[in-house]
Amino acid sequence: MTPSAATLAPFIDGSYGVTVVFLIGIGVLTFARYRRSVRRLAAVETMRRGGKETTA
Amino acid sequence: MNETILTAVPLGKTGSWLHYAANPGRFLRLVRPILPWAAAFSIALTLTGLIWGFAFAPADWEQGTAARIMYVHVPAAWVAMAGYAALATCSFFSIIWRHPLADLAAEEIGPVGAGFTAVCLVSGSLWGKPMWGAYWVWDARLTSVLVLFFLYLGHIALIRAFDNPAHGHRAAAILALVGAVNLPIIVFSVQWWNTLHQGNTISFSGNSKIYITMLYPLLIASVGFYCCFLTLVCARMSAAIMERRARNLLLAAAERAS
């Protein structure tokens, strides 16, 4: 006998919820890390260029 | 015979493409402009597949609407296995050719692959409860996927367990290669043993048991998940390369100053 849609709804919603939360979570974390590393590298390169100019 | 082969394939060119691809700076130049487009494409494809599967795909004649869980469970399982295959391939390149990008890729594939495996296990568990009456059974397919999850966790832990990163990469690469034996066990577990988990529904030899209106959203969600995985791994690799470069520049500056 096929279970009713109302009985199944929490399981379906739960599995989609877990997936969406995971995808959004890992996406946001990866994007934040990527942006942080871009900014950090840019800052370090600026500092290095500044240092060279000062030394010169 | 051997002389003919040696003449046809010059030895110097055997791994030339490998050395070309081993340059982190070249990887960064290649990947960074593509990343925003890859991310947009992955999000669009995944959203289409998930919305189609959740709201518009037909219910199964036997399982009813519970079959909608398939559109998240199956793509996550495929990506989890493909991710581990990629991890094992990177480990092979790392052990044989000491490919610097292979180590980096293996390090970044681990957490993403473990996440997709966790999604596969949780969604499978939520599918199992209404269909089998239990969230978990020690079935060959479920157990082998749980072992895959532990292999991912072991790889993540081992790669960071040594003071010398090179030792960590080497130990984790050996674990990844040994663990690759689990992949055929996962795929064929439903044929080798009597399992509660259903057999393979989709076959590339043309004997698929899925109706076309269910196959389309499943394929779109799967391609979306694969693209998400690739985009995430490439973004994490790019971030790791930039982090290392920034650290090296700072170290060099500190050495000059001292």
Image (cartoon, grey):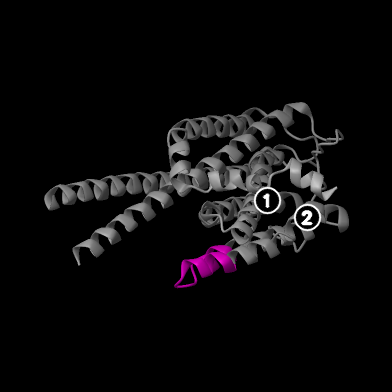
Of B138 and B59, the residue lying toward us: B138
Dot label at residue B127: none
Residue B226 percent coordinates (x, y): 61, 40
Asked whether the viewer can see residue A25, the reply is no
**For the magenta stretch, what is the residue range?**
B154-171
Question: Which is nearer the N-term, disc 2 or disc 1?
Answer: 1
How crowded is the residue under tag 2: few (<14 C-alpha within 10 Å), some, or many (20+)? Answer: few
Instruction: Say what amino acid the circle numbered 1 marks.
Output: Met
In the rendering, which numbered label is found on residue B81? 1
Q: Is residue B36 left or right of residue B19?
A: left
Q: Is B65 within the magenta?
A: no
Distance of mark 2 from mark 1, alpha carbons?
A: 10 Å
Residue at image coords 65%, 37%: B222
Q: Residue at x 79, y 38 (%)?
A: B202
Q: Position of residue A12 (x, y in %)?
A: 62, 43
Residue B161 x, y percent position in the rendering: 49, 71
The answer for which chain carries disc 1 is B
Report the predominant secondary structure element of the magenta stretch: helix
Seen at 41% across and 48% down, the residue is: B239
- The answer to whether residue A34 is above or below residue B181 is above
The residue pinned by badge 2 equals B184
**B191 above or below B150?**
above
Residue type, mark 2 in image: Pro
